[in-house]
Amino acid sequence: MTGSMALFAMEDMFLKLSAQALPTGQVLLLTAIPGLVFFSLLARQSGRRVLGPDMFDTWVLARNLGEMVGTFGYITALASLPLATVSSVLQAMPLAVTLAAVLFLRERVGWRRWTAIAAGFAGVLLVIRPGLDGFRPAALWVLVAVAGLALRDMSARAIPSGIATAQVSAWGIGSVALLGAGMAAVQGIEPVSAPRAAVLAGAVIFGTAGYWAITAATRAGEVSVISPFRYSRLVFALILGMLAFGERPDPITLIGAALIIGSGLYSFMRERQRAKAALSSAGKGV
């Protein structure tokens, strides 16, 4: 998970550079196609079919939908917002997953975790500052990204174990390619010079590696264990934002980011304590 966060931060840097020079739909399409080819070949090499009935599994389709919504919101925000701002709000995704579990899966959450969720979303408000002078409407697209990616990760856990990670990755990136094609049809396509192609290649290389890593992590790892490591992405984003774009997050943004991360870590800590208590009670019952 930590490795995927570093890879995604590098991909974000290249995507932001590309989105500043090319239409966002074209960027999505050109970066998704190589990943689709790679994971399709990887699936075939392992004897798995990319085109087959498994691609219409309910949870696969739900994951693909979340992938499309999340990617659209993310690339739209990334094109016009500082890298640190986008990454800070994105850290609220684990809290959004918890909230979604309460609303749709009827999971029970105590007052402490509700407080953590409230504190985390207060941190989001500090970062995007609605109604204040520092507010940027484009920041709302990051919230769209959070909702979509939360759906993606919740659905990934429910996909049958018989479906390979390479297949899931190919279908997810294929949905992004489809989204990019639709956006490019509306926005148009511009010529790609050699320097732009090199930047796009960087996004493809780091994005493909990160995509495989996070798909494997969310399917194989225990969510309460691996999810806190998502927050390392903000550290990488802050460093790359300063080095590549000369960004200097203001104190309010850093305070908001700290609230988001702190509340998320507390929420995961409470979840692990509850799990240990449940195991202890079960052991005593035996």
Image: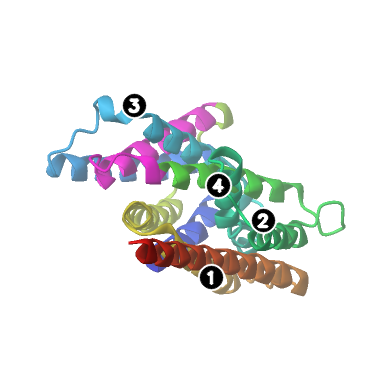
Distance from Cα at disc 4 to Cα at disc 2: 34 Å
Nearer-N-terminus badge (1/3) = 3
Position of residue 74 in the picture relative to residue 277 (left or right): right
Q: Which of marks 1 and 4 is nearer the N terminus?
A: 4
The answer for how far apart the CA atoms under marks 3 and 4 are is: 27 Å
Magenta region: 156-185
CA separation in Å, label 1 and label 2: 14 Å
The residue singled out by tag 1 in the image is: 240
| C-beta proximity under 8 Å, tags 2 and 3 | no
Q: Give me the residue at 75% from left, 72% from top.
A: 250
Three-letter code, disc 2: Leu
Where's residue 254, x and y in %? Answer: 70, 72
Q: Which of marks 2 and 3 is nearer the N terminus?
A: 3
Pick the quarter of the image with the C terminus. Answer: bottom left
Label 3 crowding class (10 Å Cα cut-off): few <14, some 14-19, many 20+?
few
**Other residues around mark 1 within 10 Å, as few (<14) / some (14–19) / many (≥20):** some
Q: Quadrant of residue 166?
A: top left
Which residue is the site of mark 3?
Answer: 56
Mark 1 / mark 2, whichever is N-terminal = 2
